Image (cartoon, coloured by chain):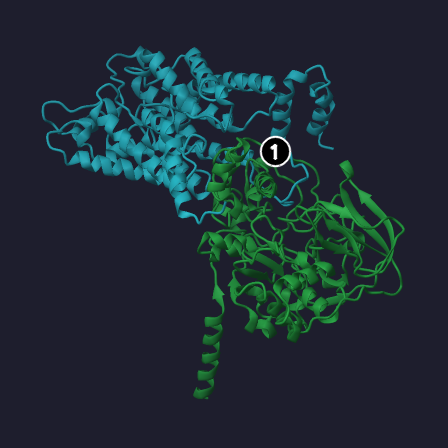
Amino acid sequence: MNPIKKIFELLEYDFSDAGKFAKLGPLFDATKTFFFLPSPKNKLGPFIRDHLDLKRYMSIVIISLLPVLFFGMYNTGYQSGLARGETLDFWPSFLSGAWVVMPIIIVSYGVGFFWEILFAAIRRHPISEGFLVTGLLFPLTLPPTIPLWQVAMGISFGVVIGKEIFGGTGRNILNPALTARAFVFFSYPVSMSGNIWVAGADAVDGITGATALAVNAEGGSSLFSTLSDQGFSLSNLFFGFVPGSIGETSALCCLIGAVFLMVTRIGNYRIILGGIAGLIITAILFYFLPGTRGTWADAGPLYHLCAGGFLFGISFMATDPVSAPGTNPGRWIFGFLIGFLTVILRVANPAFAEGVMLAILFMNVFAPLLDHLVLKHRISKRIPNV
Amino acid sequence: MPEKTGRINCINTEIMIHMEKINLSKGFTLKLSGMPDTSVIQLPRPDTVGVSALDIPHIRPKLLVKEKDRVNTGTPLFCDKRDTSIQYVSPGTGTIKKILFGRRRRLLEVVITLDAMDEFVQFDPVSAKDLSQISPRELADHLKQGGLWQTLRQLPARDTADSAAAPPLIIVCLNGNDIFSPHPGLVLQDKIRQFEFGLSVLKRFSDRVIVAARTNSLGLLAPAKHLITLQVPDIYPAWDPGTILYHIKKEAKENAAWYIGAEGLVHMAQFLETGRYPVNTMVTVTKGIDKKPHLITRQGSPVHLLAGNYPPGSLITTGQLNGRIKNPDAHLGFFENTLNIIPDTQGDEMFGFLRPGLDKPTVSKAFLSCLLDKKVQMDCTMHGEERACINCSYCENICPVDLMPNFIMKALVSDDIEEALELGLLDCCRCGLCSFTCPSKIELTRILSSGMDAHHKDKQG
């Protein structure tokens, strides 16, 4: 017999309802089912079942996040190297980046799982796989300089207030990872704006450390040349060699993840394509508005697409099925309005340089309303049967 | 030569005009292994037969016999308390061996030890000529006495047809409930005349009779081709009466359609012609990748006799997706004509959720197996654990009658039957695909079925 299985069987009694660690039963179950996929016999029809389960579902999201995760580690190291005036090779960049990023991820998972286990133990329900994704998404939206205690506070807020008080995975209104980020963003603004985007940069003078979205051209020069001067050429933005949140910088890696999610049908393509369409159309409309020269209204669709966290948000945050609408027309509208609102916030709201987080959270709140309208419409189309 | 081709074309167009088609954009797209052979074997007479009360929908049985009573073929064994004229009769002659009850004295089966020879309860035969002279009401009463009225069932609750009201239409479903139910071409072999007679019986109840067959059944059905009016695609559950009705109905009053299976209709015709209860039935048994022949056996045959040998731990069901579990000691039910023996797996799999999954059949795109186009064998396990609904819409994407099972489930668990009905709950054809595909392993089919049953019970008062 498999030795790991033997260990689980030895411990099984202690974690059962009669055992001494009965309270930690959910933790035991979660660990056990991580190693051994449970497959109980069907008691109710249908007697054959598809192989896709929530563990597989969430694992696919994790796999789709690997490109942005690895690139994020590399870029964190690379940017901090640049700030010190060195151009690092791949492995030194990657390793020094991982040294910064891994603690953030570990704190996020560790603290988040603590809350998950606590709620699961009190409520006596199994630990849901949803947190595997939340716990990785949240660190990727943070700047690499974030203090670890703020990571812990953020993920606690996201898990407890964003999800568990509603009843856990599947019942939350807002995306828990974005709720966590919004908490950090508004509670600790010093850590989330200004000279924070490059790890280890505060040791060096003369680094502006702003993201592309905070740049505005002055004195009538064009936005594009100003962006280029500061290292934000379109190709840099596309490939991601710019400072920013850990996971958001590379449009390419986000697109790879988005395509993987769409091909496996785990992320809904309607949200992603609707969002990109909304962003492009709104950006074009602003582009043709007069008198916007030098601001982000003048940036046009490509810059809006590649700069900031839009592609990260629309691919990985907006596609969270729980907080998005559950109807297909609703998903198109939801995605489109996220794209629309992102540009509006970036261009028309001077308080926030980046708008995608607020756009998604705002549309999360409206998702049930969109569903309600679509359902009413569908009911009117059916031949009644009552 | 050109003349001849012209004629063939002409015949083809005639058939085309005759036979309508429905399209199904959703449904079960996996190819399962185990399709039965088209050979037919007659099984020897069993020692016992049973009449099961478990596969009869909504019934409240009232026993009419005791243990050790003698019964003839056609003697009523129990009736439905809701309408005592609807009787379930003995498919053999012999002695009542045992009457089995479940919890709270729920009737499970009446088991009969068979004699060597059949003695029939004789009824007056009804010929094609007589048919026009008797009223639908008399015809219904005659069929109820003979124990065959219940072959006619009524949507949406799938209860026994209500003879008091004329149905808007009657659907004759040639293919059975399961993907591997008996081939209608074999069921109707040498019985086309009876089948036609049966159709004229149905015409006495409704002007609109629809005969529906799967596309891949049409080859063997050639002798009956002129009687088929609707061709349905080969996607499960396109041949289910609820699915057919959903795709052909134009107005709300059609919801109360009746339906009947191929064998039920032939039995009805045989009973009317001979005055005797027809006792033989055709069943299929599917097991792994074996191709098994069709079996002709007596109604109510013991399951273990039909099932033969199978791997331990297997589930025996009367429909992989929409049947029920059969105990090997039980007997085949009145409406059951297929046994699917579904194997178990060898325990939990290490890191099962991380494997590429070439051997994991799925209707999603989350395993590499979705790239292969080959017949697959499913096992009888869940492949995961129950979780909360995450609104992924996999159930909506597979539902053959365009329901949103996730939203209906939420309406039902919050006791909002009105919203569930508005969302089309009663269109549900209980095909089981929503539960099949749900990644959170929620028992959607059970929740929706229970909601429909509760609503039906409520309506009956």
Front position in the image: A342 or B257: B257
Q: In which quarter of the view is residue B203 placed?
A: bottom right
Q: Residues within 10 Å of mark 1 (few under 14, many from 20)?
A: some
Chain hosting mark 1 = B
**Position in image of residue A292 (x %, y %):** 13, 29
Q: Tell me if B161 is positioned left or right of A140 in this view.
A: right
Quarter of the image that includes the C terminus of chain B? top right
Residue sitting at 50 percent across and 45 percent down? A386
- How many marks the image carries: the answer is 1
Instruction: Please determine whether, in this image, residue B30 is positioned above or below residue A237.
Output: below
Could you say which is closer to the camera, residue A139 or residue B288?
B288
Pinpoint residue A89: horizontal percent, then vertical percent.
Answer: 37, 27
Relative to A73, residue A57 above or below: below
Q: Which chain is cyan in the picture?
A: A
Q: Is residue B369 above or below residue A80?
A: below
Chain coloured green in this rendering: B
Identity, as a three-letter code, of the amino acid under mark 1: Glu
On screen, residue A136 versus residue B195, left or right, reads: left
Residue sitting at 64 percent across and 18 percent down?
A: A24
Q: Look at the numbered disc 1 and give the secondary structure of its residue.
A: loop
Closer to the camera in the image, B320 or B203? B203
List x then y, in percent, for residue B215: 54, 64
> Could you tell whether B421 is left or right of B259 in the image?
left
* Residue on which the image places disc 1: B385
Q: In front here: B408 or B220?
A: B408
